[in-house]
Image (tube, rainbow, N blue to C red):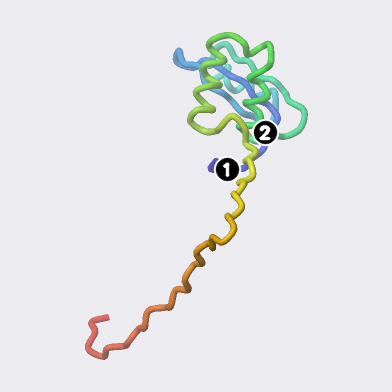
Amino acid sequence: MATDKMFTVFGVSKYNGEYKVRFANDIMRIKVLAKHGHEDIRLADVEGAMTKVDGILKIKGMDEFQDAAAQSAIAEYLEVHGTTTTAKAPVQSKPAAKGVMKPKAKAVTPAKVTEDEDAPF
């Protein structure tokens, strides 16, 4: 995610015939969206601040967003910007078999730099 901003209001609205997810920190965002021509504005105030993906996952299960248009907008957002969860699973490594040694990283030696008086730079 490009940003780690936190929001408290999540929802969907219809603009130019297309449903999209919306984020805000105040439920009064409805007035601004309506003023700019949005229709079918549905915003939900969630408890506590959340990231965009966490908030969208939260409203995904709410009754107000169970229609096909809202679920489609939510699924589209998650497909592009998130995953099914923001918590990353820990990477589990397999233990090395007995007698098998893992290769060690080789140390990289810096390249030698020589100054040439005739160089153009």
Left or right of residue 105, residue 43 in this image: right
What is the CA distance from the residue labelled 1 to the residue labelled 2? 12 Å
Identify the residue at horizontal 62%, vertical 32% (top origin): 85
Please state which amino acid type lies under the numbered disc 2: Phe
Q: Which residue is mark 1?
A: 3
Residue at disc 2, secondary structure: strand
Identify the residue at horizontal 65%, vertical 38% (top origin): 87
Looking at the rendering, which quadrant does residue 59 occupy? top right
Give the farthest residue toward the front.
99
- Please rate how many residues cluster around mark 1, counting C-alpha atoms within 10 Å: few if below 14, some from 14 to 19, many from 20: few
Identify the residue at horizontal 65%, vertical 36% (top origin): 51
Q: Which residue is mark 2?
A: 7
Residue 12: x, y in percent? 58, 19
Residue 7: x, y in percent? 67, 33
Give the farthest residue toward the top.
67
Reply above or below: 10 against 4.
above
Given residues 22 and 1, the one toward you in this image is 1
- Please rate how many residues cluster around mark 2, counting C-alpha atoms within 10 Å: few if below 14, some from 14 to 19, many from 20: some
